[in-house]
Image (cartoon, grey):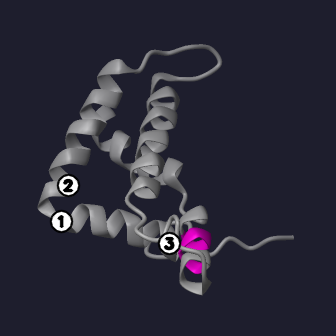
Amino acid sequence: MTTETKYNGYTNYETWAVALWIDSEECTQTYWAEAVREAWIQATETAPFTKLETATFALASQLMDAIEEGNPLTNTPGLYSDLLRTALYDVNYNEIARNWLEEVST
């Protein structure tokens, strides 16, 4: 049996930290607010997925790609790059995307 721990309403600390940093910097907040609107506009309901689920998958993938591309230690072997990669692997990008999209879709 697994017990899911929440961190400030998110799945874990890593997910919360990514969402917090994006939301606390005006330039990234503006960029992602536009990406959220665009994902919602572009999404269509395609069985078995709802429009919200389709938009969530697309936005989460875009967010994960952007975070991974921004990782300054991607090509640096060592302890710190291993720890950072592990932390970024634990981010629940779908959760962040869905939270953002739920604000737009309602």
According to the picture, the residue beneath numbered tag 3 turns out to be 14
- Asked whether the beta carbons under mark 1 and mark 2 sit within 8 Å of each other, the answer is yes
Asked if residue 105 is among those painted magenta in the image, a careful observer would answer no
Q: Could you tell which of marks 3 and 1 lies nearer the N-terminus? A: 3
Is residue 95 positioned above or below 24 on the image? above
**Crowding at mark 1 (Cα within 10 Å: few <14, some 14-19, many 20+):** few
Q: Quadrant of residue 40?
A: top left
Q: Quadrant of residue 43?
A: top left
Q: Residue at x 43, y 75 (%)?
A: 8
The image's mark for residue 100 is none
Q: Is residue 66 visible?
A: yes
State the count of labels. 3
According to the picture, the residue beneath numbered tag 1 turns out to be 25
According to the picture, the residue beneath numbered tag 2 turns out to be 29
In the rendered structure, the answer to whether residue 1 lies left or right of residue 89 reads right
Residue 47, percent from left and from top = 62, 14
